[in-house]
Amino acid sequence: MGFGAPRTAIEGEVPLPAIRVLPETIANRIAAGEVIERPAAAVKELVENALDAGAKRISVALTDGGIAAIEVIDDGHGIAAADLPLAIARHATSKLPGDDLVRITTLGFRGEALPSIGAAARLALTSRPPGAAHANTIRVEGGRVFPVQPAAGPAGTRVLATDFFFATPARRKFLKHPRTEADHAEAAARRLALAAPAIAFRLVSDGRTLFDLPGQDPLARTAALLGPEVAAALLPVTAERGPLRLTGFAAAASLTRATTAWQFLTVNGRPVADPVLQAGVRVAFRPVIADGRKPIVALHLSLPLELLDVNVHPAKTELRFRDPAAVRALVIGALTRVLGASAAAMPPPRLTLSFSRAPTPRGTPRGPLAGFAEPVLPLLAPPAARPVETSAPDPAHPLGAGVAQVFGTYIIAVTAEDELVLVDQHAAHERLTHETLRAQHLETGVRPQPLLLPAVVDLAPADIARLLAAAPDLERLGLLLEPFGPGAVLVRALPAALGPAEPAPLVRDLADELADIGEGTALAERLDRVLARLACHGSIRAGRRLSQAEMDALLRRMEATPRAATCSHGRPTFLKLSRSDLERLFFRR
């Protein structure tokens, strides 16, 4: 029996159906679902076609989130009348001059976008190459192709896709509300506009212009699309590793979002959602942002074509790197260096002022807080080369000079640029302690301080088991533990950098931290989270009054310490108010 032949029916059985070739219209509709699953995918494909056509300006207009209509107009090289039928044929493309699927230099190459849209919607493709006497148009409706007709139109191409999924009503029911579809389409357009900053780009949704940008440099385009709040916090990223080159921008760790929607990644100009790049971003930001928060980045990776396979997925948003470990290491290293800048070099988080009337004073003002007789804490001692200045702010000190402490928690400082700085003393000192412990651990190991009297800490059996299992790692971090009967551990030493920390609360918190981390977490992450927990217990607390010397020493150490703009849990350590901010607050301007 040959392959595909119907099997001879046995008495009492239902004959198996014969294998058949699907009609072209049905095959096209099935294939279209792989490429065009929603209007946003059509926006992406059409804009990529415009970019591949050498367009200098692209205009996108949406109606009802693209469900009713998507119009994309470009000033690229256009399509000749004789080629229009091929343009809407499956697997026909001008972007692969040979048979090489490795050295692909265009965004599109599969020859599926226009036929897929034509199978999913009513498509009108109008194009005019430079020098042609007139434009020509071809229409496709649910896979049915109409003859080419002369038309009016400028040089370039206009694509109008209307009535999405009219030919497949069941699929149309799965589309979301037009507002949701519009959001997805806008996100796709923004990613492409970020990937091609030199191209003028306009996006209109239901008659409302969302952005209309000229050709720009990468910083200006990134700032324009991500908004003024992000623009003020952008840090330049540049790194090379062999043939790999990474450029772009990352927002300071003090500015995060709840989702990864604000992470824009491109590879050789192609917007992607690549897990290798995403993992690199996640690992680099993990020590400086709070759990559950996502960083903001716009990163562009360039590499030789032979080190990359873009023919992995119909939507072309997934890639395969020949050396993913090198790519991941490049991203982690570049972002870690940028985030390792001291508080002095980081864009400061600023308060957003939106008062409609002057705030009403509450309570009575407290008197000045005098320093007290405790010695300056070791970690607050200023670097020897930079003397403490307490009388006036110095331009060399971006965090200024401390002038007061309020609520026993916040330091008020003033800079030479007339900026008011508010510092959370516990959050700031926690970061200083964390970085000190991390540096010791990476160099020679954290120095332990033996306790005069070992402390006995009562714990649940599960917590004891976790602590003892981690005891070798904890010993390298300066914490010496050993079992002490069935329900306790004995603490013989604490990290010297913590000062007079209480052993019991620290050990109990560590047990909780180890339970939360889990065994599947990478060792480096586990150790860093333990260091963060140790740092929290070794830091000055809210309510601890500081002397003038201690306040200024804290500011100087922050200016010299990596990642000092956020604490170990990702919260900001300081905020700034400019003179103009204060004037707005008091309705002076």
Image (cartoon, rainbow, N blue to C red):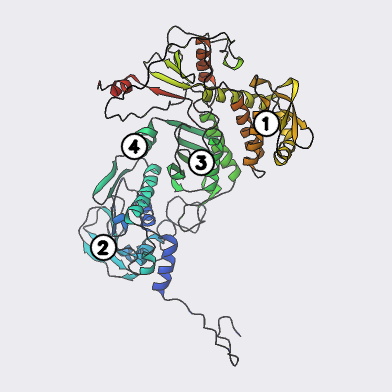
Q: Nearer the viewer, mark 4 or mark 1?
A: 1
The circle on residue 137 is: 2
Query: Label 1 to label 3, Cα distance in Å?
Result: 25 Å
Give the secondary structure at mark 4: helix
Disc 2 marks a residue whose amino acid type is: Thr
**Which mark sits nearer the N-terminus, 2 or 4?**
2
Residue 53 in sight = no
- Label 3 SS: loop
**Residue corresponding to mark 4:** 224
Q: CA distance from mark 2 to mark 4?
A: 35 Å
Instruction: Place residue 218 in its image quadrant.
Output: top left
Q: Is residue 552 left or right of residue 156?
A: right
Estimate the x, y position of residue 430 in percent, counting from the top left: 56, 25
Nearest to N terminus: mark 4 or mark 3: 4
Task: Give the residue type at disc 3.
Answer: Gly
> For this rendering, which residue is in front, 322 or 457?
457
Say few, some or many: other residues with alpha carbon within 10 Å of mark 3 (under 14 / 14 to 19 / 20 or more): few
